Amino acid sequence: MSEIQNIQWFPGHMTKTRRMISANMKLVDAVVELIDARIPLSSRNPEIDALVYSKPRLIVMNKCDMADAQQTQKWLNYFKNKGISAIAADCKSGSGLNAFLPAIRKLLSELIAKRKAKGMSTGTLHIMILGIPNVGKSSLINKLAKQKRAKVEDRPGVTRTKQWVKLSDDIELLDTPGVLWPKFEDMAVGERLAFIGSVNDDILDIESLAARLVETLRYDYKENIIKRYSIDYDDNDSNFDIIEKIARKRGMLISGGEVNFERAAITILDEFRSAKLGRITLEHCDG
Ligand code: G4P
């Protein structure tokens, strides 16, 4: 997937992003790291630890409505075993978000206790959201704020007047999330980001991408493919053979009875991205 290797996140953007995140970090008590439950590893920013440093952090595994529920549970256990707080959510419907405020209070219980011990009021707890583009940051803010807000710019470094969104009597959220750059250095990671639609399809060879997706799903999620497309295949079928079977089943033909590979490729990618192929996690947790 040479196109993916060629994607570069502008170093200039990275510098600006780092600067903005560091400046905002001073204003908050905790950070919420939003990741995609379908790719819990690849949707994390490679430098997140250095950026967040010692601030308490809550991981929100978003889009869990599209991920394999068993896998999401395994990932939650994995994070818990590492001493990292994590919850699963669907920021489109809001499902799972009732655990959000209690998780923040638990995360900051030491700070709250310390303030109380000093005879201080516990004050307002300030939090900020961080995550790569398209992971659901605006959706999370909108759901938590219980009102539709403007789409947050995906361009890092855009300075706006800081605004705090009141989530409860004791918790306020910075309305501008930190837009982190994704990790494209690793080809497999870039490919998974492309599968979920986080890379502009215009710069990708869509047929090769669909073939790679078929390769990724054909064993672990064979049932999903068979059920969705009413086809069968075995080890003798190449990934392109499988795409051809899907195209024929759906009547995606061009003149002369040839199959329209491009249409079939777009369909497979779309149906994976919209979870019509079922709830699928691309990065499995062994722990
Ligand atoms: P961002 O600010 O991090 O860039 O992400 P944003 O909230 O804009 O979300 C990106 C897309 O992902 C949106 O879809 C949004 O609806 C969708 N999304 C966010 N969270 C979830 C979730 O938990 N589950 C599902 N299924 N989808 C989610 P879109 O097609 O770009 O726009 P829309 O018309 O659907 O809002």
Image (tube, rainbow, N blue to C red):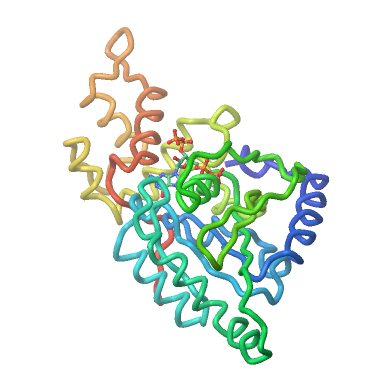
Q: Residue at image x 75%, y 43%?
A: 160
Relative image position of residue 283 (x, y in whole percent): 43, 60
Residue most toward the top? 255
Relative image position of residue 42 (x, y in whole percent): 54, 57
Q: Residue at image x 54%, y 82%?
A: 109
Q: Residue at image x 66%, y 64%?
A: 48
Whether residue 269 can be seen here: yes
Q: Is residue 161 above or below residue 79?
A: above
> Which quadrant of the view contains residue 210?
top left
Residue most toward the bottom? 117
Whether residue 183 can be seen here: no
Q: State the residue in front, 117 or 15.
A: 117
Q: Is residue 109 above or below residue 206?
A: below
Q: Residue at image x 36%, y 60%?
A: 96
Q: Is residue 206 left or right of residue 174?
A: left
Q: State the residue in front, 191 or 241.
A: 191
Q: Is residue 267 left or right of residue 20?
A: left
Relative image position of residue 151 (x, y in whole percent): 58, 37
> Which quadrant of the view contains residue 122?
bottom right
Relative image position of residue 197 (x, y in whole percent): 49, 39
Q: Is residue 107 left or right of residue 160?
A: left
The N terminus - image quarter: top right
Q: State the residue in front, 266 or 169.
A: 169
Q: State the residue in front, 273 or 109.
A: 109
> Which quadrant of the view contains residue 78?
bottom left
The C terminus - image quarter: bottom left
Give the tally of numbered discs.
Answer: 0
